[in-house]
Image: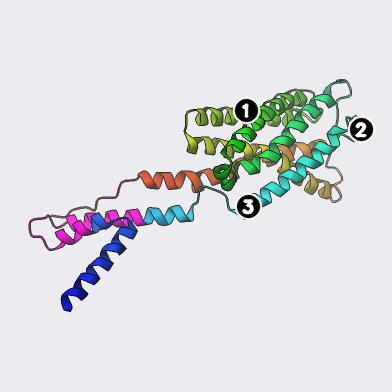
């Protein structure tokens, strides 16, 4: 009876070890714990390895590589709202409805803004769905089709943005902001495209997080402009050019910082921890 109970306890312990994924290391640790032929630090080394593996699993749970459903839904709602609001305005083709001051000396200025706003609105609409894990898993073909539309739309939007910024009457500061934004937009798009063509999915995902964060600057920009409009009632000397330049730089900065935080803490950190070897404790003679 005692022998059966002993064997049952051993089987239970064995199954528990396998569930942790460290059964081999534990068995080796047990066999060396009382062995006079093994060096005294062997068991400590194996224990440190087991603890390191467990810490990595815990860190991976704390830092998921995908945004939560609530955050993704908030991004999607705000992006869709701004995209539809912007597209509806410029689909009319009426320059008097433009919310951006136009350069009256350049007849094509409004057209360049329209050619930027419409494909950029499409980018804002598509982006959140590309980060939805369920959509990628269940509809990979749809993910690829939307990705191609996203790429083409962004190229048109970025090129039109450079031309529109050149004609802008909001000052050199705003022009430089949109020049840099367009360049970063195209660069992150290029990196994301080349990475996925090479089969490097994690690097592709990182590049597209950065790319869509730059796109989302359009949403943050409108939030800052709303705050600035409210502040004009308190500070009447504030001009629209001042507010627009400050909002442009502020929106880009905020989106870049948030994107890098997400990339480093939610995507890169688990990968780094996974590749870190277990630290070997010092042996004192």
Report how far apart the C-alphas of labels 1 and 3 lie in the structure: 25 Å
Q: Is residue 60 above or below residue 215?
A: below
Q: Which mark is residue 257?
A: none
The answer to whether residue 108 is left or right of residue 285 is right
x and y percentages locating residue 125 in the rendered image: 71, 40
The answer to whether residue 265 is left or right of residue 75 is left
Instruction: Name the element at disc 2.
Output: helix
The residue located at (63%, 27%) in the rendering is 183
Specify the farthest residue to the bottom.
1
The answer to whether residue 164 is left or right of residue 198 is right
Residue 18 at least partly seen: yes
How dense is the environment of label 1, judged by Cα within 10 Å: few (below 14), some, or many (20 and up)?
Answer: some
Instruction: Name the element at disc 3.
Output: helix
x and y percentages locating residue 220 in the rendered image: 71, 44
The residue located at (55%, 35%) in the rendering is 207
> Disc 1 designates what residue?
186
How dense is the environment of label 2, judged by Cα within 10 Å: few (below 14), some, or many (20 and up)?
Answer: few
Residue 99 at least partly seen: no
Report how far apart the C-alphas of labels 3 and 2 lie in the structure: 36 Å
Q: Is residue 44 above or below residue 1?
A: above
Q: In the rendered image, which quarter contains the C terminus?
A: bottom left
Magenta includes 48? yes
Give the residues drawn in magenta, as a range: 27-54
Coloring scheme of the render?
rainbow
> Disc 3 designates what residue?
71
The residue located at (63%, 40%) in the rendering is 213
Instruction: Name the element at disc 1.
Output: helix
Q: Which of the 4 image quadrants contains residue 89?
A: top right
State yes or no: discs 1 and 3 in contact (Cβ < 8 Å).
Answer: no
> Disc 2 designates what residue?
96
Q: Using the image as rendered, state which of residue 192 and residue 158 is in the foreground.
A: 192
């Amino acid at each position: 009876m005692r022998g059966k109970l002993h064997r049952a306890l051993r089987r239970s312990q064995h199954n528990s070890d396998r569930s942790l994924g460290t059964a081999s290391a534990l068995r080796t640790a047990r066999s060396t714990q009382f062995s006079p032929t093994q060096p005294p630090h062997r068991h400590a080394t194996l224990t440190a390895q087991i603890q390191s593996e467990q810490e990595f699993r815990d860190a991976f749970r704390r830092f998921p590589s995908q945004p939560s459903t609530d955050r993704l839904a908030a991004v999607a709602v705000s992006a869709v709202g701004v995209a539809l609001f912007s597209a509806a305005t410029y689909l009319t083709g009426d320059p008097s409805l433009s919310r951006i001051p136009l350069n009256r000396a350049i007849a094509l200025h409004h057209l360049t803004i329209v050619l930027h706003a419409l494909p950029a609105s499409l980018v804002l609409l598509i982006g959140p769905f590309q980060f939805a894990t369920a959509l990628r898993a269940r509809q990979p073909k749809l993910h690829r089709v939307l990705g191609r539309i996203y790429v083409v739309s962004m190229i048109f939007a970025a090129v039109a943005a450079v031309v529109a910024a050149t004609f802008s009457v909001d000052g050199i500061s705003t022009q430089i902001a949109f020049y840099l934004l367009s360049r970063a937009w195209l660069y992150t798009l290029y990196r994301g495209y080349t990475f996925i063509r090479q089969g490097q999915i994690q690097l592709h995902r990182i590049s597209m997080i950065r790319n869509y964060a730059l796109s989302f600057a359009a949403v943050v920009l409108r939030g800052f402009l709303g705050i600035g409009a409210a502040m004009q009632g308190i500070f009447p000397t504030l001009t629209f050019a001042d507010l627009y330049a400050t909002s442009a730089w502020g929106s880009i900065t905020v989106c870049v910082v948030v994107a890098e935080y997400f990339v480093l803490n939610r995507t890169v950190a688990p990968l780094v921890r996974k590749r870190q070897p277990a630290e070997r404790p010092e042996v004192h003679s």
